[in-house]
Image (cartoon, rainbow, N blue to C red):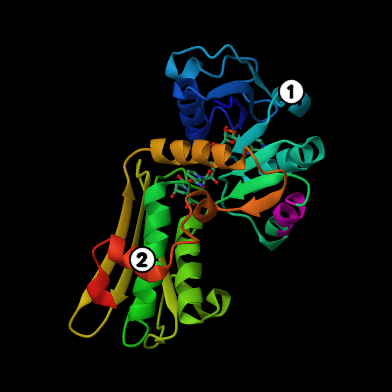
């Protein structure tokens, strides 16, 4: 069994803690290092202390120390942090799994450029459920292309700093691509005041923030006399952590290149109708 030496960035964050636990429980993974922001109270403490199971790895802010011995970095932080970590990893041949959301176009371009030097999985949602849902949405959008208004509703915890969520934006992209529309041109982010009637070519986004909601996404196809809703609801961050480990295993034999979770899960290759048949939806065709 190939042993994966993995460092975790944002080790004291919600996802960082979950990743440290998931790595400790995985027989093929070892926590080689842990990073967090300079000046954070967790620096110097054991990365496993949050879960009560010591990992024997102190959280560092110095990249050279935190990434010594790492073959992979799993990064769920903020765009500016991820881009700093990525630059170091690209120079040192460390493969990177990026879960961080909220990148601007320049940030995404920097990730594409880094992929020439190291192997990267970059995905706004690492869960298997969401990634299969993206395939369902592609299929649904093609079948509801006329006469159905499309709205994407997402809900997250009160601490989330970016909106709409990366997952909601990805759902919008998948639907827009399936319909031959440009998301940048057709997205409507929230409504207020006298908006006029709904333009049927738009894709609407609505954002809810509150409490400890882990992550809910619903796509509504609203037609005449019927509504179809495709929803995914996360009840734990464990699915994001397990997906990240799966991404690391996928990268083990890659030297460079940019991949997403559809690549990791082999969903890009699956022909659309095979997916429909697998799901017992062949009547759609
Ligand atoms: N792709 C996916 O499947 C998922 C993606 N996410 C995304 O992951 C990211 C993190 O989410 P979450 O864990 O909830 O967030 P948290 O705020 O709980 O954790 C973020 C961690 O990163 C650290 N950090 C913040 N800024 C920097 C920086 N500039 N440099 C280094 N470290 C930094 C934080 O330190 P400090 O506390 O000191 O600021 C904290 O430890 C978000 O973008 C979120 O949308 C979340 C879940 C799933
Ligand atoms: O911030 C979060 O919590 C989450 N962020 C990701 C996103 O923006 O889509 C994934 C998941 O929904 C949780």
Q: Is residue 80 left or right of residue 42?
A: right
Q: Is residue 207 magenta?
A: no
Who's the residue at 51% across and 82% down the image?
180
- Image quadrant holding the N terminus, namely top right
Who's the residue at 51% across and 51% down the image?
261
- Residue 77 seen in the figure: yes
Q: Nearer the viewer, residue 189 or 269?
A: 269
List the residue tagged with mark 2: 274
Check the image and report above or below for 36 versus 136: above
Which element is circle 2 on? helix
Check the image and report above or below for 139 versus 58: below
Mark 2 packing: few (<14 Cα in 10 Å), some, or many (20+)?
few
- Give how far across and how far down residue 256 sits, in percent: 72, 47
Q: Nearer the viewer, residue 256 or 94?
A: 256
- Give how far across and how far down residue 122 sits, in percent: 59, 50
Q: Is residue 134 left or right of residue 59?
A: left
Quadrant for ligand 1 reads top right
List the residue tagged with mark 1: 68
Check the image and report above or below for 114 versus 188: above
- Residue 152 seen in the figure: no
Of circles 2 and 1, the one toward us is 2
């Amino acid at each position: 069994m190939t042993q994966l030496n993995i460092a975790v960035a944002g080790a004291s964050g919600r996802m960082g803690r979950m990743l440290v636990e998931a790595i400790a429980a995985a027989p093929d993974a070892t926590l080689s290092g842990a990073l967090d922001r300079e000046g954070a109270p967790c620096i110097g403490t054991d990365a496993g202390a949050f879960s009560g199971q010591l990992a024997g790895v102190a959280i560092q802010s110095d990249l050279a120390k935190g990434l010594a011995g790492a073959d992979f970095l799993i990064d769920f932080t903020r765009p500016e942090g991820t881009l700093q970590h990525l630059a170091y990893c690209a120079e040192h041949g460390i493969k990177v799994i990026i879960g961080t959301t909220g990148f601007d176009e320049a940030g995404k371009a920097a990730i594409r450029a880094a992929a020439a030097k190291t192997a990267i999985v970059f995905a706004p949602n690492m869960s298997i459920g969401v990634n299969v849902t993206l395939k369902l949405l592609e299929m649904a959008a093609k079948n509801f292309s006329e006469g159905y208004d499309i709205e994407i509703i997402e809900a997250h915890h009160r601490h989330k700093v970016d909106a709409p969520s990366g997952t909601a934006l990805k759902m919008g992209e998948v639907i827009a691509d399936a319909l031959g529309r440009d998301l940048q041109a057709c997205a409507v982010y929230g409504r207020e005041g006298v908006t006029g009637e709904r333009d049927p070519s738009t894709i609407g986004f609505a954002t809810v923030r509150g409490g400890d909601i882990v992550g809910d996404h619903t796509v509504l196809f609203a037609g005449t006399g019927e509504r179809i809703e495709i929803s995914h609801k996360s009840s734990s961050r464990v699915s994001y952590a397990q997906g990240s480990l799966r991404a690391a295993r996928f990268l083990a034999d890659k030297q460079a290149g940019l991949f997403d979770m559809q690549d990791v899960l082999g969903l890009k290759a699956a022909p659309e109708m095979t997916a429909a048949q697998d799901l017992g939806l062949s009547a759609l065709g």
